[in-house]
Amino acid sequence: MKNQRILVAGGTGYIGSHTVVELQEAGYNVVIVDNLSNSNMEVIDGIEKITGVRPDFVQADCTDMPAMEKLFDSYPDIRGVINFAASKAVGESMEKPILYYRNNLNTLMNLLEQMAKHGTKGIVFSSSCTVYGEPDENPVTEAAPIKKATSPYGNTKQISEEIITEVISAGAPFKSVILRYFNPVGAHPSAEIGELPNGVPQNLLPYVTQAAMGIRKELSVFGDDYPTPDGSCIRDYINVVDLAKAHVIAVERMLEDKSDDKVEIFNLGTGNGVSVLELIDTFEKATGVTVPKKIVARRAGDIEKVWANPKHANEVLGWKAATPLADTMRSAWAWQQKLRERGIM
Ligand code: UD1
């Protein structure tokens, strides 16, 4: 049943591209739709180099309903959808809330409407641990309460989860697997694809690799006065290839009707909390490269500590984060070096 068609919205982005590789390696046919607003066509070359297969690609904006109608009409064999197409910078969402609500929610609604019309079996949705806010206890299970979102970005994830659940309760003829990612990091071990932030990186690991490369003068560690063992914030850093593999399992689960539940939610994390200072230390030991850094004030809106209880995904999906953090750090550094070789950064 593997050679079925999967539509990957946002498939040239960071997590999307790694997932396309895993889907193709598992034998699925992929069509990517992406507007290239935060990625480029070279990603397709990277996917082809790794897998030997060039995925079909349609350049279109998922908020454009006629374009989505045309896409589904021209690929009547689409059986499943994975939706990565979204804006994801927390800070930018505070400045441009309408852009975030429009991009993230209209994209989802357009895909759901087309799926219902075209008999698609299911959608895997990229959600985030941001829905838990500052959790009352760690590690966090899927039963933890959803906290009021502190950014429009976070709110789009909460609302998207609600839209999917409500559309399916109202009788839409498909299933959904909602995946709540913790902090995805690293790159494909081939260094053919990886994360390519636009401008100054907002996320920790791209900043670490750019500071290590000398592109940035020094990394600012946002706060060392949190009530954590070393005073810096704690997160659950999950390898992007491990994360991508969970999507393949989720797709198969929907396409093969392995669950009676129409909507399922899974945390995707390692189960280990790692502090900012520990992450930097792991990077330095794994690569032998020093990261210039200074401690600065806390970043507004940061969560103090959050890490996953991944038991539900481990047991029900049979999926487990397998890559050691040191290997993930080496993959991120190899990717940064590849960007330098290519003259990109
Ligand atoms: C947040 C959201 C996540 C969202 C992501 C998108 C939470 C818990 N997580 O991730 O859902 O998908 O933004 O961008 O709300 N740090 C530094 N220096 C830096 C950059 C980061 O010290 O230059 C620290 C931060 O303070 C934080 C950690 O590194 O403690 C991770 O930060 P980041 O990579 O931005 O991810 P989150 O804020 O966890």
Image (cartoon, grey):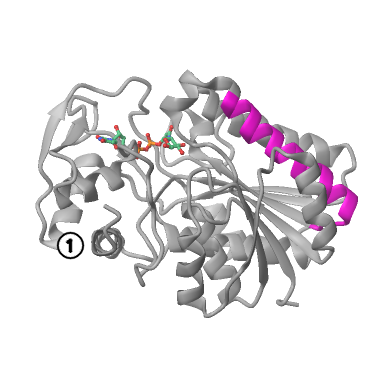
**Does 169 sit left or right of 314 as displayed?**
right
Residue identifier under label 1: 286
Query: Where in the figure is residue 35, as x and y percent of width and height?
Result: 59, 47
In the image, residue 187 sits, relative to residue 117, either above or below, namely below
Q: Secondary structure at mark 1?
A: helix
Q: Which corner quadrant of the image does residue 288 belong to? A: bottom left
* Outermost bottom residue: 52
Residue 1 vs residue 312, the one in the foreground = 1
Query: Can residue 115 be spotted in the picture?
Result: yes
Query: Where in the figure is residue 77, as x and y percent of width and height?
Result: 81, 66
Residue at the spot x=38%, y=22% of the render?
301
Query: Where in the figure is residue 203, as x and y percent of width and height?
Result: 34, 40
Residue 257 vs residue 155, the one in the foreground = 155
Query: Can residue 136 be spotted in the picture?
Result: no
Q: Which residues lie in the magenta part?
A: 99-121
Looking at the rendered structure, the kind of residue marked 1 is Ala
